[in-house]
Amino acid sequence: MSTVTETPEERREIIVEELEAVTIRFAGDSGDGMQLTGSQFTNTSAIIGNDISTLPDFPAEIRAPAGSLPGVSGFQLNFSSHDIRTPGDVPNVLVAMNPAALKVNLPDLEEGGTIIINTDEFNAGNLEKAAYTSNPLEDGSLGAYRVHRLPITTLNVNALKQEVKLSRKEMDRCKNFFALGVLYWLYDRPLAPTREWIKAKFAKNEEVARANEIALQTGYNFADTAEVFTTHYTVKKADLPPGKYRRITGNEATAMGFIAAAQLAGRTLFYGSYPITPASDILHELSRRKNFGVKTFQAEDEIAAVCAAIGACFTGNIGLTGTSGPGVALKQEAVGLAVMTELPLILINVQRGGPSTGLPTKTEQADLFQAVWGRNGECPVIVIAPSTPSDCFSMAIEAVRLAFKYMTPVFYLSDGYLANGAEPWRIPDVNALPEIKINFVTDPTNFLPYARDERTLARPFAVPGTPGLEHRIGGIEKQNLTGNVSYDPENHEMMVKLRQEKVDRVAQDIPDIEVYGDETGKVLVLGWGSTYGAITSAVENLRREGHAVSGAHLRYLNPFPKNLGEVLKGFERVIVPEMNLGQLSTMIRAKFLVDAVPFSKVKGRPFQIREIVRKVEEYL
Amino acid sequence: MNTNGNETIEHKDNAEAAASPEAYAGSMAAGEVAPPVAKLTKQDFVSGQEVRWCPGCGDYSILNNVQKVMPELGIPREKIVFVSGIGCSSRFPYYMNTYGFHTIHGRAPALATGIKASNPDLSVWVITGDGDALSIGGNHFMHVIRRNLDINYILFNNRIYGLTKGQYSPTSEVGKRTKSSPSGAIDYPLNPLSVAIASEATFVARSVDIDVKHLGQTISAAAHHKGVSFVEVYQNCNIFNDGAFESFTERAVRSDKMIYLEHGQPLVFGKERNKGIKMNGARPEVVELNSETGLTADDLLVHNIHEPDPSVAFMLARMQQPDFPQPVGIFRQIARATYEDLLVAQIEEAVAKQGHGRIEKLINSGDVWTVG
């Protein structure tokens, strides 16, 4: 390949333009490797110092029929020379590997945006599968865009067929790397990180590794030499705080956070789970961390998964279960058991579109009620929600801290967008991580299993194996102090109130909610969970235009931070953007009698910054 | 403060250990915490909670026998956990002076799995009934058995729902008239032993509440088995299904209508020890041993609990009154690595290969870059 990599003697004139931020969407068939292509572009951009934010968007079907509309897989990436918090409202560039990808994604592209099209796939068959009645490459319908037509499949095969001994099909599988090479040239990225990745990934199959490397290099060279592009672009390093960084998704951060928490607590992490999208990656990640002593248990069902986790809690270890909405519905009875037995169960819900099977691969925040109120009886749990992929790490540690300190279950609400979205993560200093203390009792003198800590109301934690502290717990109402079965009406009411009080007292132990902007003003945009990026950016934009708008983001949903009521009072209006029909806003209205305005989006997609800006403008 | 949760990594048992009392005791001694065990008595295992089963309930006998067996195991009380689901039998843990967890309907096996897997040093007992184990908990029943955790699983089968006051259960016979089946049950019943054997059980036994001596021996054998021990106990509910088993368990008819399976022995039964089970092709048949038939004990099927192939155990489990004597005893006992041993072994292997995991290294893995 040395002949191809040589710089041509006479270089054509190329304009170099500097951009602040670019949003690219890679789209193709679900077998085309678009997630991989997008991830590689993301990694490289992060390594060279851009800020990044991503939104993978893939179909629930593993391989819908090739070329079909439901089979389109997309990966959106925003990379920037300044601080960004979302994967971008509208793509500036669309890479469409086939007609279906073009059809599905074109409506999202910015006006006059750039399209890079693999023209080879625009044959009669594929056009029909994408329900095109005429070829968009010929009928003038793309006139408003800057279209680059590249016969990627052909160029790729031509580059490979002399060089590698692979079947046509195998060579075609490399075409995403050809496309990636083109994009690397276009946005002035180095090839080295992806080359390294290819070498490691295909270490056992050198021929495939070589083919992918050639495809990548050829794509790059083609863009450099062929007179398709007249401009290429640079996006400078972002001004991120100094430190060591890595790219991280929410699911990765969640898994690492719980591993870290287990080490901080000096206990074994036990993860009971049943495979479910979009939470399975946490199971995958934890199950390969056995050298941390992590025990993963792939249960026969969701109920067994949570029950096994409760069993692990009972033995004094970190009992964790993870799932998505439908799984939570199945686990709730067992969560009630953990509330009744006052054990520190932790439940991860990576929320997805519901109800029922709903939209398994899409994001939503409609399980807030399910977390706060979704069990029989008066059954309070602590509910927390990370706000960014990085925040998943900190909140995982926080979940463990609170569960053990208060001896009560904690719900950890992530969602599909956080789970799969990536951003740069400033790697924390391990020594700065909080300490997690677990107070096991070992002294049999006057031991009472349901005695209470004065401050937290937590009961003492006596685990099997401790001599002299043998006792029985269970789901039947407990007599306070002794833990014996009790049907006494007065005791029941007291215990119901005690369990509630225990959760309420957590408010004293969590940070106040911070206001982004002024403490008072016209509008407060209040959010929770993964809407953080879009809300904060929207508020930032509005403030830049001089509007009296502030933002605040809840990471603690039950109980709320103790200053929340005061914060809400400082504003004429509270707007609550949520990916549901107004669950947090309902809670806010109920608790604080504030006329909070819900702003709902339930499309399986995160909010765009401009959507929130427009909504807020209605109230200015 | 470490109360033994983490030593489990050091706890190592021979997965192939024969299911003998010696091997079991040896494995217990291998745990890091091995205080001298004071000789305990049955009374040490009585919790002092008022027992609230109906007078005359078969559960009393089972409780009594379990409490009697406990001291013989040489396991300190604090290392024993009784886990139950919901139902009359599931009140059991409250009456044992050990650690106990009365959980939710059908889920005791899942809780027990988490308890044993997170702390293999504990002796874990699941107490369940026919509704708890086979209806609402049917899925967990199958899976806890196939995973072969070293736990003991005792199913009190009274063929009725007692706590909810008398509906038919998944082991009730067809035609059973109850409050919820006034015209007779039309569900075909499950045979718990068949399901256990089909689920790859490594220890399968059956006993009867009123056959006190046999029950004690069976529970003891179950406790000594390394791996999941499944014991079905025919238990009389004298309120809602009185006499469900008396046609063959009554002392007067027991010898003729039941057969006690004994390892290495031919399948002989009858008051006069003059009847037996002989294979006729692939099927069992009841034969008389006398000069007329010319058959002796040598012609009978010899019971082998260690036979790797479960077919004969399954066949024996299917024998029932009135065509066959109702079999009790150990049907099957084979050695197989336990779930928790394999889990711990994988962790040890990972540690040996990669070293003890360090958070610092973990969070600094992947593509890392420096800013500033």
Image (cartoon, grey):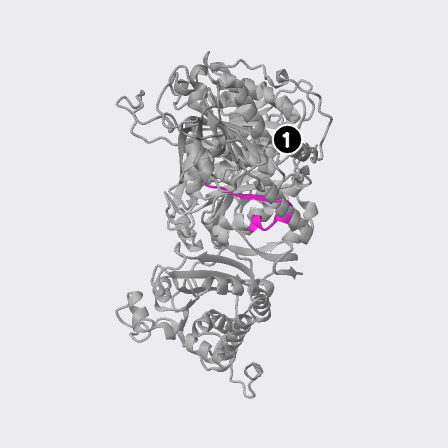
Say which residue label 1 marks: B21
A97 in relation to A550, above or below: below
A63 sits left or right of A192 in the view: left
- Tell me, yes or no, whether the highlighted magenta stretch contains residue A7: no
The answer to whether any part of residue A389 appears in the image is no
Measuring from the top left, give residue B147's x and y in whole percent: 52, 40
B277 sits left or right of B7 in the view: left
Mark 1 chain: B
- Where residue B68 sits, quadrant-wise, is top right
Give the residue type at disc 1: Pro
Q: Name the residue nearer the viewer: A516 or A234.
A: A234
Residue furthest out toward the top: B55
What residue appears at the point 39 percent right and 32 percent down from the top-left corner?
Answer: B285
Pointer 1 local density, CA inside 10 Å: few below 14, some 14–19, many at least 20: some
B95 in relation to A350, above or below: above
Badge 1 element: helix
The answer to whether any part of residue B325 appears in the image is yes
A579 in relation to A316, above or below: below
Q: Name the residue nearer the viewer: A313 or A396.
A: A313
- Where residue B174 sits, quadrant-wise, is top left
Which residues make up the magenta segment? A285-301
- Tell me, yes or no, whether the highlighted magenta stretch contains residue A298: yes
A287 sits left or right of A27 in the view: right
What residue appears at the point 57 percent right and 23 percent down from the top-left corner?
Answer: A472
A28 sits left or right of A38 in the view: left
Measuring from the top left, give residue B153's x and y in whole percent: 52, 30
Measuring from the top left, give residue A522's x and y in whole percent: 45, 44
